[in-house]
Amino acid sequence: MAELTSFAQIEPEAPAGMVPIVKAAEKAKLLAVEVVQLILGSFLSRVVCWTAEQGYSSVLVDPVEVKQLKHDVLVGVSVSKAAGLASLSVRTMWKLTDLDNGFAMLPVIGIKTRQGNRVIYGIMAEDVAAFRRQYLKTSDVAEHLECAVSDATKRLRPVVRH
């Protein structure tokens, strides 16, 4: 929270048009974590810490600017959103994009922040859809076999362990 508010100007009153991170994310059809990435990456020019509120709801941003930066800065969908699209856990999605171990089943696109000290990763939604078509989950197999997931799990050999 301290790092997040370090990017904000302290204000006793909420400036007109400024909304909490969650509301801005909702308006821009983003996840709140993506708005936080825009703040930490110094992409947002208007970030305010409203002293009347506490916690994350005290950080206000301009939803119009967030919506614009969605198209100008963010590429594809976040790893969190990609996990939702693939019906996988975020942890599993990170493993599928793990470039350090040479095991990248899904290509990621990195955008350096303005200071260059962070990278915001995105995955193209088309790549997630292609992956989903190519690879099955245990629940998909269970549905096809019309059996319980636990029965399908017993019959399958794991490919990716997390």
Image: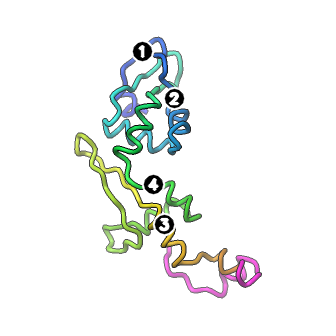
Upstream in sequence: badge 3 or badge 2: 2
Check disc 3 and give the amino acid type: Val
Check disc 1 and give the amino acid type: Glu
Quick one: SS at disc 4? loop
> 52 or 109: nearer the eye?
109
Q: Colour scheme used in the picture?
A: rainbow
Q: Which residue is mark 4?
A: 77
Residue 138 lies within the magenta run: no
Quick one: SS at disc 3? helix
Q: Which mark is residue 128?
A: 3
Q: Which mark is residue 11?
A: 1
> 62 or 100: nearer the eye?
62
| Residues under numbered marks 3 and 4 in contact, where contact means CB atoms less than 8 Å apart | yes
Q: Magenta span covers which residues?
A: 143-162
Upstream in sequence: badge 2 or badge 4: 2
> 77 or 102: nearer the eye?
77
Q: Which residue is mark 2?
A: 20
Tell me residue 5's x, y (percent).
Answer: 39, 28
Please give left or right for residue 17 compared with residue 110 in the image: right
| Residues under numbered marks 1 and 4 in contact, where contact means CB atoms less than 8 Å apart | no
